[in-house]
Image (cartoon, coloured by chain):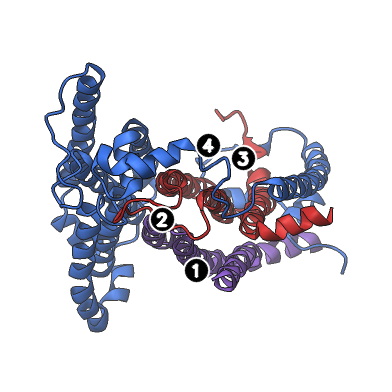
Chain colours: A purple, B blue, C red
Amino acid sequence: MTVFRVILLIGLVGCAIATAIVRKPMQAVIIYSAFSVVLAVLWITLEAPDLAMTEAAVGAGVTGTLLYLTLRRLNLIDQDEAHREKMREEADEHGKV
Amino acid sequence: MAKSDSPFRCWLRGELDLSAQLQTAEMPAPPEGERYEPRHHPALIRMIARQSHRLYVALVAVLCAVLFTVLLLTAANLPAYGDGEAPTNNEVSERYVNQGVEETGALNAVAGMMLDYRAFNTLGESFVPFAALCAVTVLMTRGRRKHPLPPEADYADYYADPIVHTMCKVIIPVILVFGTYVLVNGHLSPGGGFSGGAILSSALIIYAMVWGDQRAHGAIREKTVRRTMALAMGFYVVSKTCSFYMGANGMPNPISAGVPGRIFSAGLILPLNVAVGLAVCCTMYSFYMFFRRGAL
Amino acid sequence: MAAMFDHLLHNYEEAAAIALLSIGFCMLLFDRNLLKKVIGLDIMNSGVFLLLADRGYIAGGKAPIMAEAASEAVRYVNPIPAGLVLVGIVVSVSMSALMLALTVRVYQTYRTLDVDHLYMLMSHRRKGGRA
């Protein structure tokens, strides 16, 4: 049981670090959902099934959906890198002039 | 190439003109003959920004390191993990565990604690999503006139797929039944208002996601959602007020606790669970709809 | 010092919770994207919840569903942290919904989510304008 718990904790911290270092917001959203699922399994090992159900429905489901919808609404899912590229080009042009 | 190419760096070096960006940003258009101008001299702003940015990074790095160290030291001095004799497991939790069943009638100690011993606390906490929903309503409907959403056909056809539709026809009733089970069995098994409501709302969200929000808007009326939420919260307030009033004045409780383990037992816990669950379900569904189409 | 380190290894769940809290804190302060700041705050929340739930766990205890009375043979874990965390999760999702709505409004006004970029734009204003 302890080994299982340690594996889950490593996965949890790994997901958190991955969320922090990925570039695109969409990747961060997906990894955050995975983080919530791992946390839901961890609640079961802590003998809190109420928390596991709530975390799986709310943390992974609703929060992930809201984050995704925000990205969708702002048209940032695929265009993020392109936007940054555009800004970079603009900056370069001004630098030359 | 030592020079960083981020726009912020370029701006700090004075190489980036912001007027183009300000034109694309949907700020109120300046009147004729005027343009966006810096509040102070641009060089001054840039100098302050450069200095404060460096200071900020340094301070935050120190702060994070100190916080992490102090908290780890605290964890090293906490009572051992899983220790039953730790001060956190004191007489309060012992009473909840040992006498909870006869005092509240609920087999699930968490539900008994939340909706009987600490019902007033839970009332306040179920008003927090409600308050957040009010704020989201204001924020999302204000921007709607100036920033209309793209027509639904632009994104809904992505899901118009027979496989997805057939799967959802099977899955949504199952989720609804499971959510209802979790909701009404909250005092007997793990679950209760918060988890059951979240599961029910996830079924509604899947429906709205797959069949488009126009159809969901037709199926689940705005008025229904509002009335359900108001009724649920009102019922909670009224029933718990009665309960507290009679309990404080030593009057006999008209609702018997029943036999623990039956579905109709545990006094007010079952109706309160249903009320909290409906409120949470409506709140989550409304969040989804406000983020999706800017209206319920 | 060695004893303290041993104790920390025994309290490994708490150490992980504190690591989550610190990662979330760093994300909140270092990341320039507003959306990732929101996710960072959610991760911080999860760290706090994990620490709370760890404090209520009793080794060998069962989930507090009283199918049989508590005795020497059957121990139940502490129900108080579970109740606190349960409402905490719902409150945290409401909070992130509110912050995401604010993020949407910020983006609609300034067309960017980068805080440095926002700072640049907000240091300019219309000449003779209201704000």
Q: Nearer the viewer, residue B74 or A30?
A: B74
Q: Residue at x 57, y 40 (%)?
A: B87
The residue under label 2 is which amino acid type? Answer: Leu
Residue B252 screen position, x and y as percent: 15, 24
Label 1 SS: helix
Which residue is denoted by mark 1 in the rendering? A34
Q: Amino acid at mark 1?
A: Ala
x, y percentage for residue B106?
26, 46
Say which residue label 3 marks.
B35
Name the residue type under label 3. Answer: Arg
Query: Mark 2 or mark 1, which is nearer the start of the sequence?
Result: 1
As drawn, B270 above or below B289:
above
Q: Quadrant of residue B45?
A: top right
- Give the Cα separation between the discs numbered 4 and 2: 56 Å
- Few, some or many C-alpha atoms within 10 Å of disc 4 (few <14, some 14-19, many ≥20)? few
On screen, residue C28 versus residue C68, left or right, reads right
**In this view, which residue lies farthest toward the bottom?**
B163
On residue B31, the disc is 4
Q: Are marks 4 and 1 on the same chain?
A: no
Give the Cα separation between the discs numbered 3 and 1.
Answer: 47 Å
Q: Which mark is residue A51?
A: 2
Label 4: which secondary element: loop
Chain that bears disc 3: B
Are labels 1 and 2 assigned to the same chain? yes
| Labels 4 and 2 share a subunit | no
* Label 3 crowd bin: few (<14), some (14–19), many (20+), radius 10 Å: some
- Label 4 vs label 1, nearer the camera: 1
The residue mark sitting in front, 3 or 2, is: 2
Residue C103 in view here: yes
Chain under numbered label 1 = A
